[in-house]
Image (cartoon, rainbow, N blue to C red):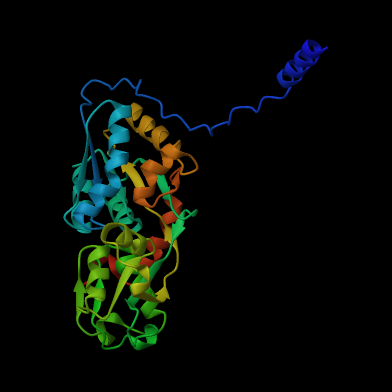
């Protein structure tokens, strides 16, 4: 009997359900390159405007550049324009293979030379973004109405949120930057504008929606160091275009490689998060008509400070 009881005990223990092994979430695979580069295609030059300081841009694009290089099987060279106008000039001259254009530089470049475009950026869950006018958190300036006489910093005459839409936001409230502001500076990139505000070299500045997060990432500066006194109308985000002579098979592959990226999976997050991008969508030239209209309204096509 004792043996029988022991046997039954063993059988009972064997019958206990075994907990299933934990299921790990599947990661979206990134396909290793099987792309056959056409003859003569030995590198890809990616031109970008100097939206941020050079080091910050190099860091933010590094993983995407590496991804495209591995998938296309050729070196990808990141070329940072000296200015927004320089990017427009290089684009018109065909001195690039693909170019990431901000909304207004796209309007300028496309007017000079129609471009095949591949994708538009999506960021913060939206295909559009706003610009900001910012001051230091402790500034007495509370609104656009307080700007007359203020030392003001723009990014570049061809910057969408760093100039065009900031000017419109002021004009809409009866402030003419040329007549009512104090000294005006063009500082070249959005980080430079924010740092000039923070250091007290200017009283207020124009920048884009994601610049405070970018400055936190690059310089560890708390976004709460600034106060947003105005938000501009929203615009479409940056658009990636190609040199018309770039082989169509290459353009199609780049578009495919970017369209599959999303921050909803680990691989996409690693590639896109440094750029503050969620993913990409098909390009739509008509989405930039509003930018063209605003630029014409504020006289930006031939604007002088």
Quarter where residue 296 is shown: bottom left
Residue found at the very far left of the displayed protein:
82
Residue found at the very far right of the displayed protein:
1
In percent of the image, x 26 and y 51: which residue is there?
A: 112
Quadrant into which the C terminus falls: bottom left
Regarding residue 247, the answer to whether it shows in the image is no
| Vertical placement of residue 264 versus 197, above or below | above
168 and 27: which is toward the camera: 27
Quarter where residue 68 is shown: top left
Quick check: 94 left or right of 209?
A: left
Regarding residue 47, the answer to whether it shows in the image is yes
The x, y position of residue 109, in whole percent, is 28, 52
285 and 128: which is toward the camera: 128
The x, y position of residue 41, in whole percent, is 23, 26
95 and 181: which is toward the camera: 181
Quadrant into which the N terminus falls: top right
| Vertical placement of residue 16 versus 157, above or below | above
| Vertical placement of residue 210 versus 242, above or below | below
The x, y position of residue 89, in whole percent, is 19, 51
In percent of the image, x 21 and y 58: which residue is there?
A: 53
Quarter where residue 148 is shown: bottom left
Total number of numbered labels?
Answer: 0
The x, y position of residue 304, in whole percent, is 21, 72
């Amino acid at each position: 009997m004792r043996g029988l009881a022991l046997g039954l005990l063993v059988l009972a223990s064997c019958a206990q359900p075994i907990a299933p092994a934990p299921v790990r979430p599947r990661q979206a695979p990134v396909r290793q390159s099987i792309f056959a580069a056409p003859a003569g295609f030995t590198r890809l030059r990616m031109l970008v405007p100097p939206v941020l300081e050079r080091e910050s841009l190099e860091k933010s694009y590094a993983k995407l550049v590496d991804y495209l290089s591995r998938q296309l099987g050729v070196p990808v060279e990141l070329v940072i324009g000296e200015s927004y106008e320089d990017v427009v000039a290089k684009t018109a001259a065909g001195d690039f293979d693909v170019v990431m254009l901000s909304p207004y530089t796209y309007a300028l470049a496309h007017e000079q030379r129609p471009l095949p475009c591949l994708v538009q950026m999506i960021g913060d869950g939206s295909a559009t973004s706003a610009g900001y006018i910012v001051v230091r958190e402790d500034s007495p300036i509370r609104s656009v109405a307080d700007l007359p006489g203020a030392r003001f910093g723009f990014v570049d005459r061809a910057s969408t949120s760093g100039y065009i839409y900031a000017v419109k936001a002021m004009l809409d409230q009866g402030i003419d930057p040329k007549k009512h502001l104090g000294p005006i500076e063009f500082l070249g990139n959005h980080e430079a504008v924010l740092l000039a505000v923070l250091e007290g070299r200017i009283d207020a500045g124009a920048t884009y929606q994601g610049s405070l997060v970018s400055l936190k990432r690059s310089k560890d500066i708390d976004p709460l160091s600034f106060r947003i006194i105005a938000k501009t109308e929203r615009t479409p985000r940056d658009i990636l275009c190609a040199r018309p002579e770039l082989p169509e098979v290459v353009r199609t592959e780049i578009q495919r490689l970017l369209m599959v990226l999303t921050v909803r999976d680990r691989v996409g997050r690693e590639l896109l998060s440094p750029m503050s991008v969620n993913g990409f969508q098909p390009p739509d030239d008509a989405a930039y008509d509003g930018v063209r209209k605003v630029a014409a309204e504020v006289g930006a096509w031939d604007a002088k400070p």
